[in-house]
Image (cartoon, grey):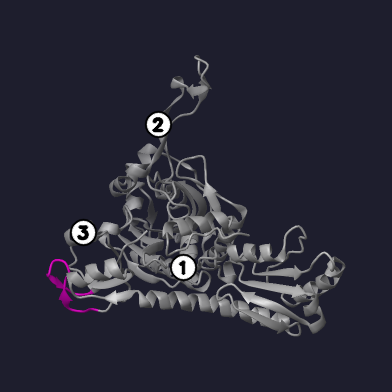
Amino acid sequence: MSKVITPQEEDYSKWYNDIVQEAGMAENSPVRGCMVIKPYGFAIWEKMRDALDARFKATGHQNASFPLLIPKSFLSKEADHVEGFAKECAVVTHYRLKNDPNGKGVIVDPDARLEEELIIRPTSETIIWSTYKNWIQSYRDLPLLINQWANVMRWEMRTRLFLRTAEFHWQEGHTAHATDREAIDETILMLNEYANFMENYMAVPVIKGVKTANERFAGAVDTYCVEALMQDGKALQMGTSHFLGQNFAKAFDVKFLSREGKEEYAWATSWGTSTRMMGGLIMTHSDNEGLVLPPRLAPIQVVIVPIINKNTKDRLSDIAKVVDKIKAEIPNVTVKYDDDDTRTSGFKFAEYELKGVPIRIAIGLRDLENNTCEISRRDTREKTNVSLDGIGQYITDLLEAIQTNLYQRALAHRTALTTKVDTWDEFVDVLNNKSGFIYAHWDGTSQTEEAIKEATKATIRCIPLNNPAEKGVCVFSGKESNQRVLFARAY
């Protein structure tokens, strides 16, 4: 297999697109801004989805499904919400086509206009809270802990596979509670679930924090987020968890009878993460040879390639017996034995390196004689000759070592690209010559936040949770500041 990946140092954007396409993860679709997720890419997403779904259910949540289409009038019920999403909404106006009388294919039937136009969901708070009105009457109905796995559409103008597409897959949790404290606790709980998943499965270190008013989800009282740093020094928001207060309950008149017999509005949360995590996975770990996957999310954790030639094909059965022995010793590991004799072993090595398979095992006739095999790890590309005795434990330990190494490597990279600055000149210098996360004082005003964004394209990624109080002066305005916040340029 010839080299197909553009080096990061040459063109980071092209490097990313090359990996997505050449590793068989996704490709552009005929619909502008949308993508086709290919089987290998979807297999990674399924492992993410299954791990998260198990975590959601373990914390008491249930899955449900709500409509793709939302009556346009629903969005206008919550003013901040509609303002936040109005420019991204795709609208369904008609329900029928007909043949063009001029013989030019089909046209929209003008007599089939919908009485009320419908919005393809950009998010589902409105349709879900209109439903909750029928589900919630008493405090006994609370908390209501619902999650939905779905696709949504936001009409993005500038798109990039996985990172920002018009249509994307995600999960969205929507919960209702009897008190504000319960809802806030739920918001933080799910933020922590995201962070734990990202660090323990994706091997991506994240910073948890709260968004500023400017960056808050449309219709939320508070938005919490998990932020990660990519190899090029840009930040990526990996997931969000929102405390919605009583805004949507009031918009859709969702009331319940409290223990004290009083009628009250329910308290709400919503939280979501999406296939954007796939982009984060690529940009955190991958290299110029292709995809690098943490073992816990790899569709193929171990690939075994026999080293044979046309004169020794009759020995394939002997290698197959060794492969069966290895598989038996690692029953909970996904193993592929690639004995396809139409491709050379060198071609296979390059292919599985491109696809990011964590461990590659090569076994030839000499290995059979010596009771050994050659093991190559994808994260470091190191090769080691290993005895077949105790091979199961060796592979199990190595998979854990690779998982840990990827996390530690990403953490070291983030640490190296995290800088405290105290002046505007330092701020601009770091952004332009080092990049990464910047801890800097901010005066707390939206005006200063917007001015910094306008001048540098850097945004406040979050105010980190448990942020220490620290007196200082804002790097931009020179006004008093009580804490540093996290800035970066971002995707």
**Amino acid type of disc 1?**
Thr
Determine which residue is flagged by label 1.
284
Can you say whether 333 is above or below 77 in the image?
below
> Does residue 276 appear anywhere in the picture?
no
Spatial separation of the CA atoms under disc 2 and disc 1: 45 Å
At 33% from the left and 75% from the top, the residue drawn is 418
Q: Nearer the viewer, mark 2 or mark 1?
A: 1
Foreground residue among 169 and 231: 231
Q: Quadrant of residue 267?
A: bottom left
Instruction: Determine if the magenta segment contains residue 478.
Output: yes
Question: Residue 419 occupies which quadrant of the picture?
Answer: bottom left
Which badge, 1 or 3, is on the more N-terminal residue?
1
Disc 2 target residue: 116
Classify 10 Å Cα crowding around label 2: few (below 14), some (14-19), many (20 and above).
Answer: few
Tell me the SS state at disc 3.
helix
Q: Which residue is mark 3?
A: 455
Locate the N terminus by quadrant: bottom right
Q: Which residues are magenta?
A: 469-483
The one nearer the camera, 258 or 290, is 290
Badge 2 or badge 1: first in the primary sequence: 2
Task: Residue at 77% x, 74% y: name it.
Answer: 364
Expressed as whole percent of the image width and height from the top left, the position of residue 322 reads 80, 75
